Image (cartoon, helix red, strand yellow):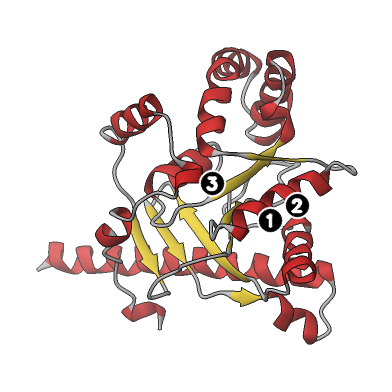
Amino acid sequence: MEKSLQPTDTKKRRRRKRPRRIRQNWFFRFLRNFVKLFKKRPLIYDHNEDIVGSAIFVSNHSGAAGPMDLSMFFPYYFVPWGAHEMRGNYRTRWKYLYYVFYQQKLHYGKFKSFFLATILAVINPFLYANMRLIPTYQDIRFKKSLRESLTYLDDGIPILVFPEDSSEGYFDTIIKFNEGVVVLADYVDKHRNLNIPIYPVYYSKRAREIEIGKPAYYRDLKAKGHTRSEIADILRKHINTLYENIKARKARNAKAKERVRKG
């Protein structure tokens, strides 16, 4: 199936009217469109005819690029989850960016981390407010994240989650998933009696490709006796499969170009 998959024409989807609840500030739209002038639009490979209504997207983070690039080029509207520190005050944002995001996760040096954290801690509130980022927590406050997510799903607006365990950094092949996305799916099932579809997504910055896989359904996985950790691992493997698809396409394209070069 993957070999015959062609890039998806997303023009009609991009023309869809943005839901009122996630309308963006005019300056944010201007800034986003300005930045897009300097970025190559990624090819979209979508295994689905269309995605409409309540859903959960689970994606790799693709280093520092993923969240913002997906907000610009992903063919469906969404509201993302993110670290609660990024919705805190300036000091909280700066410390998270400097110590955790840039040094621990991206392995940047101290000077580069200091420079980027100092700048981005100023502008990130504006960016994340327009993206409607839902802050997530590792304590009892996580219930607030679940309740807020449910209000968007009630309006038919999907939630985007980056579940990979990035405590040691971001990798092309995801090694471990956090279970928060499974908790969200269970919360939706219990409070709305909805067998929520969970779509795997992989974004490759190097290949400039986004691949969207077929959905897994939480209730179906649970009915098979899978535990929360097992469901998280199944989703992780689905995303890694999309990465393998992207690598295979790249290899085929390289071979095709080599044959053309040799005549």
Q: Position of residue 123 (x, y in %)?
A: 53, 19
Rounded to the nearest angstrom, the CA distance separating label 1 from label 3 is 26 Å
Alpha-carbon span between mark 1 and mark 2:
6 Å
Local SS, label 1:
helix
**Amino acid type at mark 3:** Ser
Return the disc, 1 or 3, that comes first in the chain's sequence. Answer: 3
Residue 155 coordinates in the image, percent (x, y): 56, 57
Give the label on residue 150, or none.
1
Q: Is residue 48 left or right of residue 98?
A: left
- Numbered label attached to residue 110: none
Whether residues under marks 1 and 2 lie with C-beta atoms below 8 angstroms apart, the answer is: yes
Is 95 on the left-hand or right-hand side of 119?
right
Distance Cα–Cα, label 2 vs label 3 = 24 Å
The image quarter containing residue 137 is top right
* Residue at image mark 3: 62
Instruction: Judge whether 32 appears above or below 198 on screen.
Output: above
Tell me what residue is drawn at x 51 percent, y 75 percent: 214
The residue tagged with tag 2: helix, strand or loop?
Answer: helix
At 51% from the left and 29% from the top, the residue drawn is 127
Find residue 261 and report its horizontal and vertical position in percent: 14, 62
Can you identify the residue that label 2 sits on? 146
In the rendered structure, the answer to whether residue 46 lies left or right of residue 102 reads left
Q: Pointer 2 and pointer 3: residues touching (CB < 8 Å)?
A: no
Q: Report the residue that reaches farthest toward the bottom.
A: 224
